[in-house]
Image: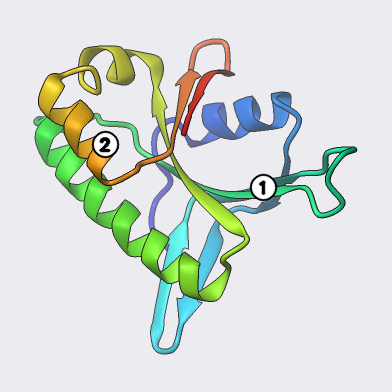
C-alpha cells in the first residue's frame, strides 16, 4: 500500500466536516489482475436522493521540486483511476483534492486550466490549515 500524501488527514477531516461519511481509507480499485489504491471513498446521503452521492478522492500534495512534474503524475494517475472506476464502480465520481495555494498558484495557469478542462478533472480545493473545503469544481 502506498504512503499517504502529506495532507491526507487534513483533506479527510475537511470531507467529514462537509457532511460526508468516509467509507474506505484507502479505497481499493481492483480490475482483473490490477489493484490500485485511491486515498479515500466517501458517501453522502441526501434527503432528496435515495442512493445519495458517492465519491473517490485522490489527494495530491504538490510538494515535489517541480509542480509540472507533480501535475503530470497526478493527471496520469487520475485518468487511470477514472477509467477503471467507470468499469468497476460507475456510481462513483473521482475527485482530485489539492490545497488552496496549489489551486491559486498553479491550477490558475492558462496551460493547466486548459488541461484540467480538456480532461474533465473534478477538483476539491481544501484549506489545509482550517481543514475546510473551499470549492468543489466540476
Q: Which mark is residue 42?
A: 1
Where is residue 57? Give x, y as percent: 51, 45
Rendered residue at 44%/88% (across/down): 32
Q: How many marks?
A: 2
Mark 1: secondary structure: strand
Residue 33 or 46: which is nearer the viewer? 46
Mark 1 crowdedness (10 Å alpha carbons): few <14, some 14-19, many ≥20: many
Please state the horizontal and vertical placement of residue 66, each as a whole percent of the image: 9, 31
Q: What residue sits 49% from the left and 77% below the top? A: 30
- The figure's colour scheme reads rainbow
User: What whole-number distance in Å separates the C-alpha atoms at marks 2 and 1?
Assistant: 23 Å
The picture places residue 44, in percent across and down from the top left corner, at 76, 42
The local crowd at label 2, few if under 14, some if 14 to 19, many if 20 or more residues have their Cα within 10 Å, is some
Relative to 2, is 22 above or below?
Answer: above
Q: Position of residue 127 (x, y in %)?
A: 49, 14
Task: Please name the residue that numbered disc 2 is placed on.
Answer: 116
Amino acid at each position: 500500500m502506498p504512503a499517504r500524501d502529506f495532507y491526507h488527514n487534513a483533506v479527510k477531516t475537511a470531507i467529514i466536516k462537509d457532511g460526508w461519511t468516509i467509507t474506505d481509507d484507502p479505497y481499493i480499485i481492483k480490475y482483473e489482475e490490477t489493484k490500485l489504491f485511491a486515498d479515500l471513498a466517501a458517501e453522502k446521503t441526501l434527503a432528496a436522493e435515495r442512493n445519495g452521492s458517492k465519491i473517490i478522492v485522490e489527494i495530491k500534495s504538490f510538494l515535489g521540486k517541480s509542480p509540472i512534474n507533480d501535475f503530470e503524475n497526478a493527471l496520469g494517475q487520475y485518468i487511470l483511476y477514472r477509467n477503471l472506476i467507470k468499469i468497476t464502480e460507475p456510481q462513483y465520481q473521482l475527485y482530485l483534492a489539492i490545497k488552496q495555494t496549489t489551486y491559486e498558484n498553479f491550477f490558475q495557469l492558462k496551460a493547466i486550466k486548459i488541461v484540467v478542462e480538456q480532461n474533465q478533472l473534478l477538483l476539491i480545493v481544501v484549506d489545509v490549515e482550517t481543514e475546510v473545503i473551499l470549492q468543489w469544481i466540476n
